[in-house]
């Protein structure tokens, strides 16, 4: 993880870049490289605070700040009216978590440990939740695509708000489930082993600074999207579904792989599936709510996003059901990810 | 369940309403309120008869009369040529059983008993059957929608009849499976505990009277559909997929919730999944056969119904696979149901 | 299996037919009847060679030659530019293996042995692989159908080649997985019991002769396709998806049923699912590579094939998950197959 620390050098470079007015495409790249380590530090800060807050508040903080980077980037994209980028980055985060992160973790862990097993029961609870949530989130879009494309994004904000409220309520209830009524099925293992590295004050300071820096870099990043898509001939859709999720989650991804190498496949799965759940139940509704202050955004995914989302969730459920993983399974998840990425790139 | 008994008052009210010629919309509401308790009494009558007939004939009676109310309502809708209502009420019954009934049962049972477990093996047999049956039933529709919409309902009666015959044969074979070749995996627990409340003669009389009354009220209900859709601005489709299944199955629904509260989650699941199977393998083909005496009805579902059906069945299979349920899972099923209902309402 | 031997008489008959210039439709039927026993003998020859080569090479040979007949027929169809036939026979082989072969095996085995159980763990590994592979293979097609139909088969060869290379690499890696890193989870039972019937020289001679004869008969078969479709009013699509897979796999099918009757359900499942995997990961990419020497063929399935493929794979995963089979499950798989075949026939 040391490489992440070295990447912090891109923060001053990006500021200098802004100052000397380099092209927006280069700003996109510099800010992307800055966000990766910042997201990692923000994650560490949250972890540290949980040592002081106790597992309940800590779990809540991790749950809520886990996708903060994604949320901040999407906020600025929303402000710019880049709805396609926002929606595709929601779908892309789920796809990336399940196929890329889990695939890489299973491959790395499987090469080292041959066959890795995990607690099927806990993983099945989250993967079922993910299936139900994604079906719920996708149903308005599935219905819409069979009606009349022309009506898209004009009449469906009402439905999007209803769905977002339902998702957000389920998010709140899932916190009640994890921290009150069924807390015994979860083990807050992460917070128990080891002691705090930083003082509470230092942790909070780091958290605040990294959040502010991520916000600044996200604004650089978003203002570069238009330019980078033109320069490299990419679509906004490709930037949203492939690039932004990788930038926002790279730190979390590396944690997942490290856990798999330590043969803690449960933690890897929890990161990948738990993070996807958070995106669907927390980030997506919050973005719809925020959009009401600018231009209302509907949560109607396009067909590409729907297919990729549903395929990913079916795969996650199949994986969870096995109770075991190996390197070949990892390769297969990665293969599906690359086929999706290649299709988006070519089409 | 006492409230159901009090609702019988709506039967004379509906007759008076008919006599004094109230508007068809009000007749729709009055007959709906009458059918709910009648369906419950018909179910009780069938149960009582099984005490005298022994488990085999009793199981068969329950299997066949379990969805009699639905069948009678659909019969009158068919006679009126309301094909959309008939087809959407078939899909709606399956969706309602899995999402609404099972969701409510899991929520109620889960709040009382924390985590409820059920016999995974039996439930997996039914949920597999449901998956295979729904795939079989939906394949002609899926193919049709990719060809040419204009041909719908004109050329596909032949295919519908073939599919209906296959479904009906599987229904007969599934009875052979349950009552002869594999009867040991099913326990006819309901009929063993307790004794008959009513004499055989009384049971038959009650069954006959309730059937006749349901038939009369169904005719009132169906003739009010046109008026209620116009008055409330609902679509026929919404009436078929949401309202009719609730009216026809309310009694059964309450039994499922009561069983969940008694921590008999197996029975709740058997009601929800078994009843869905009956709709697919028995009610749907019978309606196609009956339609041949009026205007032949094809069994080609529209895209909304297909999506909702397939989503429900995938969810049922996921739920069955867990072997356990809790209140959050119940909330999630209900959430998917409400999202589907809201989408149908808004779109 | 003796009936297969008697069918060899159709080889000289087909040669005479060719010589006296019978109609191409009759040549289609004669060559079809010749290929069935030849495919069986080729399979036997491969099995015999494995006795001499040891399990690793033997497993590889079985893996590679298992669908040789299918590959040879498709090769000639490819040469003739019958892309629709080639693609539909790929989809048809998977559908036939899972629904027809597995259905017939479960029905036959279930009638004799009531409930048959199998090693869930091994079957889940293959059925997961099948799910991931089919999703990977279908994603370009799913995306394509949502874009613009007019572009089909013109711009997507690039994407097809990428997907084919990925599939082929996974095929190679799956051999590494089965024969090196995870060989312990597979039991090479077939090769251990019994001794070689034929000498190595005889086995090789038989393999070579049967391959040559299959090649000749396949050319007869393919040149008859045009004529048979016109004479019987069938579509090329129907020939590809239903007839060719049955002709190419009849011998293998009968082995699967025989194994089920011997209560070796593991072997039946391995044949059906393993053979499907081979089609997706080996036969399909090889055909795309070969097509580059003639006219490049894209691997974009049509909607019918996609629906039938995805339905079959979901069913295979559900079946694998049960760990048990019975005659009713067999009937249900056959029912789905007949509904698919009837839909293709009627539409």
Image (spheres, coloured by chain):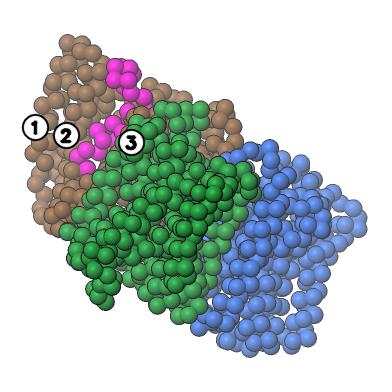
Chain colours: A blue, B green, C brown
Rendered location of residue B72, percent (x, y): 38, 48
Lateral position of residue B117 relative to residue A71, left or right: left
**Residue C268 lies in the magenta-colored region:** no
Residue B298 picture quarter = top left
The secondary structure type at the circle numbered 1 is helix
Q: Residues within 10 Å of mark 3 (few under 14, many from 20)?
A: some
Lateral position of residue B173 relative to residue B135, left or right: left
Query: Which residue is labeled 2 in the image?
Result: C37
Tag in front: 2 or 3: 3
Rendered location of residue C282, percent (x, y): 37, 43
Tag in front: 1 or 3: 3
Identify the mark nearer the N-term, 1 or 2: 1
Query: Which residue is labeled 3 in the image?
Result: B161
Q: Quadrant of the N terminus of chain A?
A: bottom right
Rendered location of residue C344, percent (x, y): 36, 32
Query: Which residue is labeled 1 in the image?
Result: C6
Are the residues under badges 1 and 2 in a single subunit? Answer: yes
Q: Quadrant of the C terminus of chain A?
A: top right
Name the one closer to the observer, C106 or C211. Answer: C106
Above or below B261: residue C47? above
Q: Distance from label 1 to label 2 (Cα)?
A: 8 Å
Magenta residues (range): C225-253
Q: Chain of mark 1?
A: C
Is any atom of residue A230 visible in this view? Answer: yes
């Amino acid at each position: 993880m040391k490489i992440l620390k070295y990447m912090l050098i891109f923060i001053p470079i990006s500021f200098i870049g802004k100052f000397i007015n380099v092209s927006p495409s280069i700003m996109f790249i510099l800010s992307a490289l800055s966000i990766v380590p910042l997201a990692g530090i923000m994650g560490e800060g949250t972890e540290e605070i949980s040592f002081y807050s106790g597992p309940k508040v800590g779990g809540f903080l991790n749950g809520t700040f886990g996708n903060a980077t994604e949320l901040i980037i999407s906020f600025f994209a929303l402000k710019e009216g880049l709805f396609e980028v926002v929606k595709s980055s929601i779908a892309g985060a789920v796809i990336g978590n399940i196929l890329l992160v889990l695939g890489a973790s299973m491959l790395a862990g499987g090469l080292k440990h041959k066959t890795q097993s995990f607690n099927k029961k806990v993983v099945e609870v989250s993967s079922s939740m993910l299936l139900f949530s994604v079906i719920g989130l996708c149903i308005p879009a599935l219905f819409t695509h069979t009606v009349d494309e022309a009506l898209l994004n004009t009449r469906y904000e009402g439905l999007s708000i209803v769905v977002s409220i339902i998702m957000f309520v389920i998010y709140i209830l899932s916190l009640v489930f994890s921290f009150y009524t069924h807390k015994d099925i979860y083990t807050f293992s992460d917070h128990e082993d080891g002691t705090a590295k930083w003082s509470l004050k230092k942790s909070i300071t780091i958290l605040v600074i990294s959040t502010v820096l991520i916000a600044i870099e996200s604004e650089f990043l978003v203002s570069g999207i238009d330019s980078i898509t033109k320069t490299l001939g990419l679509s906004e859709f490709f930037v949203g579904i492939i690039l932004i999720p990788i930038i926002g989650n790279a730190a979390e991804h590396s944690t997942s792989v490290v856990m798999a190498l330590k043969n803690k496949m449960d933690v890897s799965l929890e990161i990948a599936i738990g993070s996807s759940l958070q995106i669907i139940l927390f980030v997506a509704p919050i973005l719809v709510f925020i959009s009401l202050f600018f231009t209302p955004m509907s949560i109607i995914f396009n067909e590409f996003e729907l297919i990729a989302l549903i395929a990913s969730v079916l795969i996650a459920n199949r994986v969870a059901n096995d109770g075991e993983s190996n390197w070949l399974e990892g390769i297969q998840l990665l293969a599906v990810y690359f086929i999706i990425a290649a299709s988006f790139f070519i089409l």
